Structures are given as structure tokens and as C-alpha cells.
Image: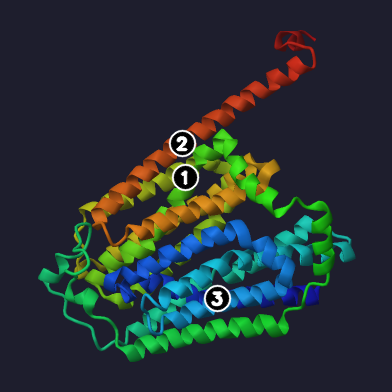
Amino acid sequence: MERNLKNVLVISFGFVLLFTAYSGLQSLQSSLNAEEGLGVASLSVLFAALTLSSMFLPPIVIKKLGCKWTIVVSMCGYVAYSLGNFYASWYTLIPASVILGLGGAPLWSAKCTYLTIAGTLYAEKAGKNAKDIINQYFGVFFLVFQTSGVWGNLISALILDQSSNKVEITEEDLKCCGAFNCLTGTTNSTESARPSNSLIYTLVGIYTASGVLAVLLVSIFLDQIQSDQVETEKEKLEAPSFWSTFLATFRHLKDKRQCLLIPLTMYSGFEQAFLTGDYSKVYMTCALGIQYVGYMMICFAGVNSLCSLLFGKISQFTGRKLLFALAAVLNTGCIITLLLWKPHPKQLPVFFVIPALWGVSDAVWQTQTNAIYGILFEKNKEAAFANYRLWESVGFVIAFAYSNMLQAYVKMYILLSVLVLSMVTYGAVEYLEAKSSHRTPAATKKENGKSPSQETHM
């Protein structure tokens, strides 16, 4: 157990080091690389590459390299993204985004495969239930991993807070903040007060070092899973071909429930993209300064993590419908508030209350949407979760793609429209499920040659 636990901890802390860098850079892209919309364009390209990667690369790369070296090689893609931020331009950041996106899906697939195989092997040796051990391993991983958002944003907040380029925010500057923000080219002095190059190099240098440490930690201390070759041979003999798995993703769209869940899944991408790409820029950076973005994301990540744990436990008592309703009400309230509110530095608590409430609702979108996919499509989980990753990524891509073209209030109306559509189609899914569950007992009895009335009289 000690050796297995060591491997789980190596992966967990490797991911913490890697995503400390990535989460910090992602939160800052819309503000740090605002010129010509480079930051959000890079995120749009990143998620587009991630979408393609999810459909094609994981099984191929894992079979060729094995789990350990897939993780190592994929991590190098994240380091390349950090390096691209040293001198951010269309010729450095966009290719770096493509590399990271292509490496993202194999990284997560290899991690899941490694933990699953390691848990299964230990369970066989110890005579324990494999599911229990695997759940323990994933529990340890996510307990450690969830802290990466805090560390990455704390580093950016502490470093950027030392900026000497801070400017006094005037009432004229604040006119460009909020829902009716000024588009690129008419930004206020706060948005244009970019931190000095020395501070940016320090920040990106720390993030790059964190990524390199992650690569070294996994390369040196993670054991190559012994059953990699055995598993590969088993897959060749038993598993469906790559193309059949790929086509199964699209064949799954024949299921009416999957089609109805597409708006809800895409909304998850839309709402996350809005917080990191738009709220951080036109509210936080515009009215307070870029140094506050890190603190804002710490608030969001902390609340999100705690609520994810809470909702995972209480969903069995409340049911998913109540939680989805809570998330929809909170998100709607936040959007309406942002449409009406003119941000001002004197209203500091409001800047943090909104991401905190957003964190509560996002915890529902993440935990419950994943759960409903697992419950509704239990027999086709692989195809179902491939669709989940696909449509969430499409939401990210679309939201980041139009980020620089529209004012914030237009994007909020789009967000609100997608939310309303999501709740309508989700309601239709629940209706179909309720209808199906009522019909099943009668159908079962009919198949047994007994009508419901006959059953009652026996």
C-alpha cells in the first residue's frame, strides 16, 4: 500500500505544481494579454485543440507511451504554454495554446488510467474491493489537486500587488467598466496600466519553474505501471477499435436525452469562460486593477471546492432538481446584478461576493452535470462522457471567440439565454425520465403476461 500511495501522491502533487501555473495564467489572460484580444483568443484556440484532442489522441498516445510517459510528455505542453507567456504574441502564444490543448486530453486520460490500474492491482493483492480502493485514490488526488487554483492565483496576486504601474482610478475611467464596457481601443487607464516587464517575467518564471518541477517529480519518482503492456494487449484483443469508439461518441447523439443535455453542458463552458475572461477584465481589472484578479479567483476556487464536497454529500437527500434550481437562481441573480451594477472601488465587498456566489452555482454545474451523465447513460458511459467533454469545450470555444467582439451586457444576455434554454431542456430530460419510470413497471408486468389489474388481484 505504501508504494501505491507514494505513486498516488506523486501524481497528485505533480498536478498541483502543473496547474498552479496553468490556473494562474488562465485567470490573467484577458487582462495581462488584452492587446488585440490575444489572451482570450489563445484560450479559445486552446479549448478548440482540447476538443480535437479529446476525440482522437488519448488512446493512441497511451498505447504508444504508457501512462507514466504520457503524463510526462503532456505536462511538457503546459510548460510550453508558460514559456509562450514570456513574450506573448500571436506567433508564440497561439502555437503554445495548440500544444497545451493537444496534450490536455491525454494527460487526464493517462492520470485516470494510472490510478484505476494501480487501485485494481493493489485490491487484487490485498483481497479488497477494487472500487473502494480506486475511489480512495481518486479522493486523495482531488483533495490535493483542488488546492492548485488557490496557489496559482495567490502567487499572481502577491507578485502583481508590487506593481509600480498602479494608477489612480478616476470617475472617467470607471465609465469604461461594467456591463457597458468600452471595447478594445478605448480602454481606460487602469486596463492599460500593464505591470512592468520585470514583474511579468518574475511571475511567468515562477510558473514555468513550477511546471518543470512537476515534470521532474513525475519523471523521477513515479513508477511505471507494471501492467501497461498487459493492458495494451488486452485492449487489442477485447476493446473496440479506435474508430468504433470515436463513432460511438456521435452515435450517442441518437439518444434524445443526450441531445437535450447539450445546452446544459455547453452552459458549463459559457459560465466558466465568462468569469475568467469577462468578469476578471471588465469588472475586477477595470475598476480595481489586475493585482486583484488573483484574490478574486481564490475566492471563487475556495467556495467552489467546499461546495463541490458539500453538494456531493447532500444531493442524496435533496435530489438533483433542487440543486439545479438553486444554481440557476444564483447565476440569474448574479447576471442581473452585473447588468445593473456600476462597479466602483468603494464597493469592494461586492467584487468578491459575486465570484463567491458564482462558485456555489459552478459547483452544482460541475458535480450534478457529471452525475446525471453517469446515471442516465450508465451503459454507455464512455460515449456519454466523451460528449460531455466535447460540448463543454464547444461552450468555452464559442464564449472566448466572441469575447473581444461584444460588450459585456450582450454577452450576459447570451449567457442568460443559454441558461434559460438549459433549464428548459433539462426539465424535458427529467420529464422523460419520470415518464419512463412510471411506464416501466406496467411494461414489465405486461411482458410477464399479467396486466396491472391482474397483478393487484393476485
Task: Name the N-terminal-most of marks 1 and 2.
Answer: 1
Q: 174 or 180: nearer the eye? A: 180
Identify residue type, mark 1. Answer: Leu
Q: Residue at x 83, y 72 (%)?
A: 226
Q: Quadrant of residue 342?
A: bottom left
Residue receiving disc 2: 425
Q: What's the amino acid at mark 2?
A: Thr
Residue at left offset 39%, top offset 88%:
201
Helix, strand or loop status at disc 3: helix
Which residue corresponds to mark 3?
77
- The reply to whether the C-beta atoms of the residues labelled 1 and 2 are less than 8 Å apart is yes
Q: Quadrant of the N terminus?
A: bottom right
Q: Secondary structure at mark 1?
A: helix
| Numbered label attached to residue 264 | 1
Is residue 221 positioned above or below 360 on the image? below
**Quadrant of image for the C terminus:** top right
